Image (cartoon, rainbow, N blue to C red):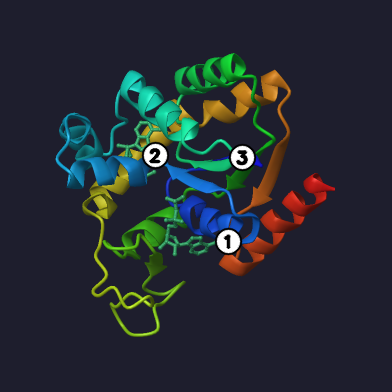
Amino acid sequence: MKLILLGPPGAGKGTQCKRIVDKYGMGHLSSGDILRAERKANSELGQKAQSYMDSGALVPDDLIIDMMIAAIKKAPSGYVLDGFPRTVVQGEGLDAALEKAGEKIDAIVNLQVPDEPIMDRMTGRRSCPECGAVYHVVNLKPKADGQCDAGCGALTQRKDDTPEVVSYRLKTYHEQTAAVVGYYQGKGNTILDIDANQDIDKVTASVLGKLDALNG
Ligand code: ADP
Ligand code: AMP
């Protein structure tokens, strides 16, 4: 299965992708995770992306499109795209590459959340720097305070999850990313709208239910 997960920052894309991948076994291609790995490796791409990410701005389209097309080529049997495409230009770049390869996206999962809960979700997010697992200080607590359930060690807070940067990321979402849903509607893609302003497990049930129905 080839899926795209859309939604504002903090919608729960990473959280739900993990559960989709656990059930269906495709690759999880998160543009944010790939960029953070590039930064950790201090690669040229990581260095170029750094200032954009720290301020909450989008990394330039050409860098992202090349990076994600390369990742997709390494996952021929299926994937769920998380955080990409984030502009209409990225959507067009993705579609052109897929068309060239004779492939298509099966469905777009659109996580719908109003702005109000986003600040609490993102400032309360804690991540494992080793395995990438994502928790929340209230909504999804680890078993031991501040420690990854997988035994990796201490959880950390992302530098771009401060109130100032979260506000800017939400603004960026409304100005540059929200239009991606309309782009895919215009192309006639299958879009699965999900109410993501409810408990994590309820969102998962809704997502998996719709994907099961899609698979027939
Ligand atoms: P995204 O990948 O869309 O930025 P995440 O999956 O990282 O979002 O979720 C952001 C934060 O919100 C995490 O701390 C996560 O535990 C929490 N979260 C995710 N989904 C929900 C939900 N439905 N209700 C409450 N908190 C949630
Ligand atoms: P995320 O992990 O999805 O919250 O992304 C973290 C940051 O990485 C974003 O605020 C952007 O700076 C950058 N980023 C991730 N994905 C993209 C993308 N598709 N286009 C541009 N920038 C991106």
Q: Residue 26: where, in percent of width, then height? A: 58, 49
Q: Earlier in the sequence, mark 3 or mark 2?
A: 3
Mark carried by residue 22: 1
Q: Which residue is mark 2?
A: 31
* Residue shown at the point (20%, 42%) measured from the top left: 39
* Residue shown at the point (25%, 62%) measured from the top left: 157
On the question of residue 136 being in view, the answer is yes
Q: Nearer the viewer, mark 1 or mark 2?
A: 1
Please state which amino acid type lies under the numbered disc 3: Leu
CB at disc 2 and ligand 2 closer than 8 Å: yes
Tag 2: Cα neighbours inside 10 Å, few (<14), some, or many (≥20)?
Answer: many
Ligand number 2: quarter of image: top left
Q: Is residue 33 positioned above or below 177 on the image?
A: below
* Residue shown at the point (26%, 61%) measured from the top left: 129
User: How far apart are the two marked residues, 1 and 2, measured between alpha carbons?
Assistant: 19 Å
Q: Nearer the viewer, mark 1 or mark 3?
A: 1
Q: Residue 187: where, in percent of width, then height? A: 68, 19
| Direction right: furthest residue | 216
User: How far apart are the two marked residues, 1 and 3, measured between alpha carbons?
Assistant: 14 Å
- Helix, strand, or loop for circle 1? helix
Q: Is residue 114 left or right of residue 68?
A: right
Q: Is residue 142 positioned above or below 197 on the image?
A: below
Q: Residue 123: where, in percent of width, then height? A: 32, 60
Q: Which residue is mark 3?
A: 3
- Helix, strand, or loop for circle 2? helix
